[in-house]
Image: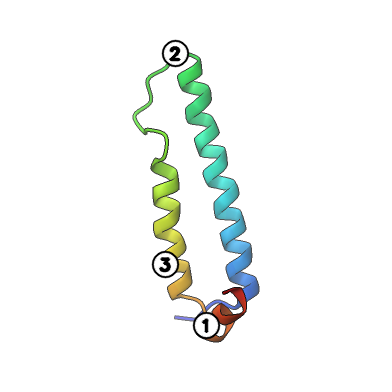
Amino acid sequence: MNKLTGFERFCISSALDMWIKEQEQHIIKAEAAGKRTIIAQGYWKMVGEDLERKITKLTYKKHLEDVR
């Protein structure tokens, strides 16, 4: 399997952050409309943190040094 460069990691992480915010907004809007959602607030953030750890493992170590 190929490793990710710093730029690729940045792109994926940015897209993941936008997606998490969008999903959280859907939950907030649904609850404000009186709907009961199956997924609670904070779930997507938890999933995102897990994915972020996996993305970090797939990134070249030398590219991670630039981020830290």
Label 3 Cα crowd, 10 Å radius (few <14 / some 14-19 / many 20+): few
Does 36 sit above or below residue 8? above
Does 33 sit above or below residue 62? above
54 lies left or right of 33: left
Check disc 3 and report the residue beneath it.
54
Q: Marks 3 and 1: in contact by CB < 8 Å?
A: no
Q: Marks 3 and 2: in contact by CB < 8 Å?
A: no
Quadrant occupied by the N terminus:
bottom left
Three-letter amino acid code at the position of disc 3: Lys
Does 23 sit above or below residue 9? above
Disc 3, SS: helix
Three-letter amino acid code at the position of disc 2: Gly
Which residue is at 65% across, 72% downward?
7
Does 57 sit above or below residue 42? below
**Residue 60, numbered circle:** 1
3D distance between C-alphas at marks 1 and 3: 12 Å
Label 2 Cα crowd, 10 Å radius (few <14 / some 14-19 / many 20+): few
Residue 45 percent coordinates (x, y): 45, 46
Disc 1, SS: loop
59 lies left or right of 54: right
User: Earlier along the polypeptide chain: callout 2 or callout 3?
Assistant: 2
Q: In the displayed orientation, state which residue is furthest to the front.
A: 68
3D distance between C-alphas at marks 2 and 3: 35 Å
Residue 9 percent coordinates (x, y): 58, 69
Q: In the displayed orientation, state which residue is furthest to the top.
A: 34
Label 1 Cα crowd, 10 Å radius (few <14 / some 14-19 / many 20+): some
Check disc 2 and report the residue beneath it.
34
Residue 33 percent coordinates (x, y): 50, 14
